[in-house]
Image (tube, grey):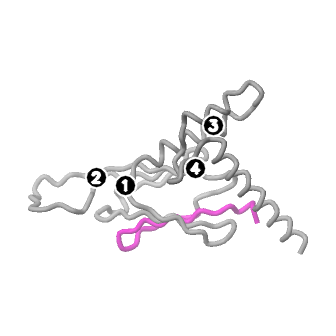
Amino acid sequence: MRQILEEREISEDADLLIETIKVLCGMDLRGRFNMARSRIFASPTLVGFEAIERMLEDVEKASSDGYPPYNIERLSETEFSISLAVAGFGYDELEVQVEGHRLVVSGNRSEDEERVFLHQGIAGRQFRRSFLLAAGFKVIRSWLEKGILHIAVACPICR
């Protein structure tokens, strides 16, 4: 029972830390960072915060393009599911890889010059979408089902 209470306290502390960073860095109401205000980390009295500043800059870069659309679902405290709408892509045209703490999903579709579209409303352009993973989180598996790429992410050591 004590362990559950400690985990809740840690979770609440983490949420408070995230909210504080958002305020200090100037996150706007849409969840985007105002990087001009993030220079708070440039203060000479803050030592060792460079990694956090780089992470926040990476978040800003990663969230600038809305394609492909995605969902992130919390399955438990240590398990998440990331789903990307990738209509028209085959599994062999998609790549899921982890680079450090960054999950990178990319899609490269070969052009079919023989096809002539009267209307093309299904976006099939190349993409690269990245997500920052917290320490300890790993990609468990990925699969493609009905035009949705699912990626299971978990933290096995966080249990």
| SS at mark 1 in the image | loop
Q: Between marks 2 and 1, how big is the CA–CA gap? A: 9 Å
Q: Between marks 3 and 1, how big is the CA–CA gap? A: 25 Å
Q: Between marks 4 and 3, how big is the CA–CA gap? A: 13 Å
Q: Residue tagged by mark 2?
A: 125
Q: Are marks 2 and 1 in contact (CB under 8 Å)?
A: yes
Q: Amino acid at mark 2?
A: Arg
Nearer the viewer's eye, disc 3 or disc 2?
3
| Residue at screen point 74% across, 32% down | 48
| SS at mark 4 in the image | strand
Q: Between marks 2 and 4, how big is the CA–CA gap? A: 23 Å
The mark that comes first in sequence, 3 or 2, is 3
The circle on residue 67 is 1
The mark that comes first in sequence, 4 or 1, is 1
Does residue 100 lie above or below 87 as drawn? above
Position in image of residue 88 (x %, y %): 28, 64
The mark that comes first in sequence, 2 or 1, is 1
Q: If the image is split into quadrants, where does the N terminus sit?
A: bottom right
Nearer the viewer's eye, disc 2 or disc 1?
1
Boundaries of the magenta span: 140-159
The circle on residue 7 is none
Q: Residues within 10 Å of mark 1 (few under 14, many from 20)?
A: some
The circle on residue 132 is 4
| SS at mark 3 in the image | helix
The mark that comes first in sequence, 4 or 3, is 3
Nearer the viewer's eye, disc 4 or disc 3?
3
Q: Amino acid at mark 1?
A: Tyr
